[in-house]
Image (cartoon, grey):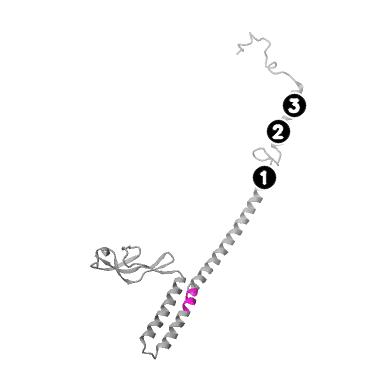
Amino acid sequence: MKNPFRRFFPDMTPENNLPQDDNLTADATHVAGEMADELTDPNMTATGAAPQPEADSANTELAELKDKYLRQAAEFENYKRRTTKERMDLYKTANQELMAALLPVLDDFDRARAAVRDTQDADTVRESIAIIYNKLNKTLQQKGLTAMEAQGAAFDPELHEAITQIPAPSEDLKGKIVDTVEQGYYLGEKVIRHAKVVLGQ
């Protein structure tokens, strides 16, 4: 089939479509040769780029991080074992300080028992008991124990345990605590024993 454009461009032939330049032909041949060399270069990667030195650096950094992780994991295991042992030791000796503080009170009881063993004087016995009680109370207060003031207060289920109700002796004591059967105590700010109380109705 004839080219319809031949009648407008009679000199256009396939040979005339591209300029014939010997230098251009040589350059194309050189470039083609270089591409063939690159394709056969054993140092080239599948993407056509040489291995990057960053890959070796990344592998080294990964190995260092792994070693650091293993060391920290071992240190944490040692820390857990050490704290577990310390906690067990603390449980065993948790009351040691309190017991040591109460020993002088126990000594006072021994001396009072020896002193009143052969006496008939009730005042001497009462005085001995009062001295020991005050000493015991002071020692416990120093350890953070505080008695709960419940008498005449409004009932609070967070602090009190009502065991019964009785007619209130006065109008202002209705619904309030009229008697304490068993004293409640705080240790610091924590309730360690609720007060057993009687409510007025």
Q: Which residue is mark 3?
A: 27
- Indicate whether 68 appears above or below 200: above
Q: Which residue is mark 2?
A: 35
Q: Residue furthest top?
A: 7
> In the depicted view, which residue is nearer to us: 53 or 155?
155
Q: Amino acid at mark 2?
A: Met
Answer with left or right where residue 3 lies relative to residue 144.
right
Looking at the rendered image, the quarter that the N terminus falls into is: top right
- Indicate whether 75 appears above or below 89: above
Q: Which residues are the magenta region?
A: 96-103
Residue 125's spot in the image, x, y percent?
38, 84
Residue 121's spot in the image, x, y percent?
37, 88
Circle 2 — which element?
helix
Q: Residues within 10 Å of mark 2 (few under 14, many from 20)?
A: few
Q: Which residue is mark 1?
A: 54
- Which quadrant would residue 108 be assigned to in this image? bottom left
Q: Residues within 10 Å of mark 3 (few under 14, many from 20)?
A: few
- Which quadrant would residue 191 be assigned to in this image? bottom left
Q: Residue at (70%, 33%) from the top-left corner?
A: 35
Q: Amino acid at mark 1?
A: Glu
Answer with left or right where residue 53 lies relative to residue 89.
right
Magenta stretch encompasses residue 76: no
